Image (cartoon, coloured by chain):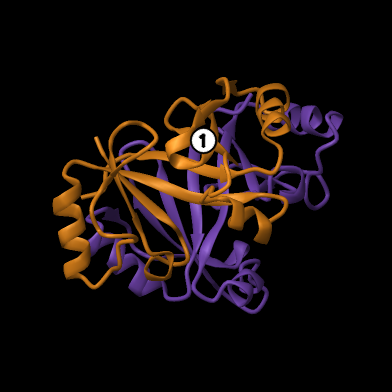
Chain colours: A purple, B orange
């Protein structure tokens, strides 16, 4: 069911410093900051040959990562995203197996303009998993 | 400098259950458990089309992930691994930029039989980074 690892998302306390570190010290391909007001984050994409890293920084007053950064002031890995072909079929299969889908259970349009769902970390080894339909 | 994302390592409290969940519920390609006594872990590899997930479970009395699981009883993402072409050049570049390399600074032979180093999470947005020479 799950396909490619679409991205690893890392919440960072200083987006400019983190982007500079990936560009200058780690020598990766780093994009410009992109505000995603619908998702409460500013994102910098790090392009790797086989997948990408997303650096996340809070945007606005109700950012979903503000609490994470309060608990993890140095930053940390926030979630990983797996691609699926059919997000409703994936959701139904997961729920039938007893796994919890966050929110209403209906897919939302994610930061890449595609339907996404998040799975409860307690049901997946403490890992917040995003599913993105591709 | 950094190349492919070699793997995402997730420490899990129940290796059999986690492997069954990735195989049966998430529908991924799951390998058999492999004991790595030199590294204090039992590993299950999850093959994705573009990278892999490594499920880690403590092996022996001095496992490097025992403390992590004590702090995170449900499990959690333990580290991510980037590939590099020349691990000594990578180390020198990182240290020149003020980043801390864990341990002696000399590469060890990792779980894949290749030289690896770990970077200090406090210097990298709370993320434990493994570099593996490929």
Residue A8 or A134: which is nearer the viewer?
A8
Where residue B67 sits: x, y (%)?
60, 57
To which chain does the residue with label 1 belong?
Answer: B
Q: Which residue is at 55% across, 66% downward?
A: A41
> In the orientation shown, which residue stands out farthest toward the front?
B61
Which residue carries the number 1 mark? Answer: B53
For image coordinates 36% across by 31% down, the residue present is B112
Rendered residue at 36%/36% (across/down):
A50
Q: Where is residue B70 in the image (x, y as percent from the top left)?
A: 67, 57
Q: Nearer the viewer, residue A58 or B86?
A: B86
Q: In this view, does A21 lie to the left or right of B121?
A: left
| Dot 1 crowding, Cα within 10 Å, few <14, some 14–19, many 20+ | many
Name the one closer to the observer, A25 or A63.
A25
Tell which of B97 and A89 is nearer to you. B97
- Quarter of the rendering occupied by the C terminus of chain A: top right
On the rendered structure, is A21 left or right of A33?
Answer: left
Quadrant in the picture for residue B18: top right
From the top left corner, tell me how far across and down residue A123 is, in percent: 76, 44
Residue A115 image offset from top left, x and y in percent: 64, 41
**Numbered marks: total:** 1
For the residue labelled by badge 1, is the local secondary structure a helix, a strand or a loop?
strand
Check the picture and name the quadrant holding the N terminus of chain A.
top right
The answer to whether B21 is drawn above or below residue A128 in the figure is above
Q: In which quarter of the image is residue A129?
A: top right
Q: What residue do we see at 39% from left, 54% from top?
A: B129
């Amino acid at each position: 069911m799950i396909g490619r690892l679409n991205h690893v998302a890392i919440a960072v306390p200083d987006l400019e410093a983190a982007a500079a570190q990936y560009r200058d010290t780690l020598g990766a391909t780093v994009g410009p900051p992109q505000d995603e007001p619908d998702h409460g984050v500013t994102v910098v994409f790090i392009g790797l040959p086989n997948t990408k890293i997303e650096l996340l920084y809070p945007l606005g007053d109700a950012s979903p990562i503000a609490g994470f950064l309060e608990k993890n002031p140095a930053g940390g890995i926030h979630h990983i995203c797996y691609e699926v072909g059919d997000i409703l079929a994936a959701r139904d299969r997961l729920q039938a197996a007893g796994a919890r889908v966050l929110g209403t259970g209906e897919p939302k349009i994610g930061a890449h303009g595609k339907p996404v769902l998040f799975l409860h970390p307690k049901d997946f080894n403490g890992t917040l998993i995003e599913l993105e339909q591709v």
